[in-house]
Amino acid sequence: MTLVDLKIFTNSLFSMDTRTFNRKYLKLVTGMDRRAKELWGSDADFIDGPDSMKEKAAALKRVPEASELQELALELLEVTGNPFTIHDYRRRYYLTEILTGLETTTRVLKGEDVPYREKLRAYFGINPRRATESVFERAMQRLDESLPGRGDIEARYSEWEKGQTLKPEEVEPLLRMLMEETRTRTAQYLDLPEDDRVDLEFVRDKPWSGYNTYRGDGVSVVAINLDAPMKISRLLEVGSHETYPGHHAEHMMKELMLGLKRGYVEENALTYNVPRNIVSEGIGELSMEIAFGNLRNGMEWYNAHTRGKKIDIDQDLAIRKAARNLDGARTNLCFMIHEDYVGEGEAMEYMQTWWKHKPRLIKPVTAFVKHPIFDTYSFNYTHGHRLVSQAYRDALRNGVPKDVVVERLFTTQLTPKTLHYLSEAA
């Protein structure tokens, strides 16, 4: 035995065993959930799912102090590199990033003024820049050219959207038809459980179009906001993002393959403010491409399988592309609020300059980015889409079969720093 081997062996005698690590990890995240609610109110859910973890947090007899939670996070961080505690080297790397995000949140819970960019790096492993307004100017010009008619962009966008928007009673039948199709397509790549289930809810007065709550054991509840005008193509995106092959499929497969079969407790206790979020949202944003090859193919499938309104595909894609290039205004909104400390009125006025086509979303989006848990979350959509789609396409170009790439996305612990694993030889 070499000196190095002896040192590792000696350290292992005093290290934390895996069972103790898992127990303390659950103590950390359930305590953080309760502490967040104590500070920010009953709707400040730090645990995203499943139900069993939320119930465990609610049942705590004592809410730990934020300083206790930070000490616990640091203790767990210290042992993640020990192979006698965490046997799998990929999991060790993943947990280091996860616990870095969690420890940073404990500092926020303590009342520390953690710099905004430091939170972005710690939570999601990204260092984004402000968007360039010249991009917005070109996007506004393209939007003006793509919309039918002439004149005021807001009025023309609203009129075009009205012609593409489903009535509330039309949403559920289309969503169920979409789920049946996308589940069949997803099952070509993943061994989905036979008895998994997605329950639908229809809500109002929310700052989002759709929301997945993974309840555990292969069951999700997907809520659709009927106050958000639901264009046909938007419902295709939201439906696949939240169900198959998006959040429901991902959470379910990782719970099954990693949480239950391998005992990776972090896959049974989903939280915010960790790199898992950006990969998960990236998968959701990529879901139409995984299921149909691209959004155009999904639109063509809809047109071929419905007797209802048809999508003018070329026009829809042109308008969508221009509007997507205006999403960077939300990035700038985040920095204006959290780095420049501008008031809400000035921030919303800025958004009104660039979001002329969807002014009704400005207020809820501004409220979302001011939420103490979700103040950084918006970056997961734009940056997650870019990072995951790039890694996914690189893997396919490198000759990795699609079924292998998809399986890795849905059964491997990934962060922005480890997405290159998708391109490893099969």
Image (cartoon, rainbow, N blue to C red):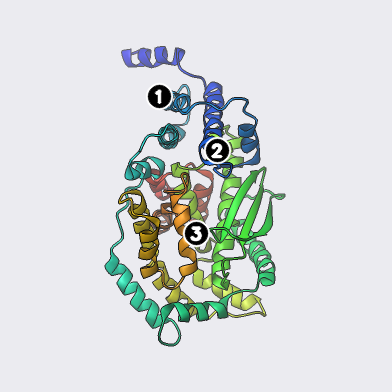
- Which three-letter amino acid code belongs to the residue tagged 3? Pro
State which mark lies toward you, 1 or 3.
Answer: 3
Name the disc covering residue 37, or none: 2
Residue 7 appearing in the image: yes
Inter-mark Cα distance, 1 to 3: 40 Å
Residue 126 lies left or right of residue 205; in this view the side is: left
Residue at point 65% right, 30% down? 59
Name the disc covering residue 59, or none: none
List the residue tagged with mark 3.
364
Name the disc covering residue 78, or none: 1
| Between 332 and 95, the one nearer to me in the picture | 332
Label 3 environment density (alpha carbons within 10 Å; few <14, some 14–19, many ≥20): some
Q: Position of residue 409 (x, y in %)?
A: 49, 49
Inter-mark Cα distance, 2 to 3: 21 Å
Q: Secondary structure at mark 2?
A: helix
Residue 358 against residue 276 in the figure, above or below: below
- Which three-letter amino acid code belongs to the residue tagged 2? Lys
Indicate which disc, 1 or 3, sits on the residue closer to the N terminus: 1
In the rendered image, the quadrant that contains the N terminus is top left
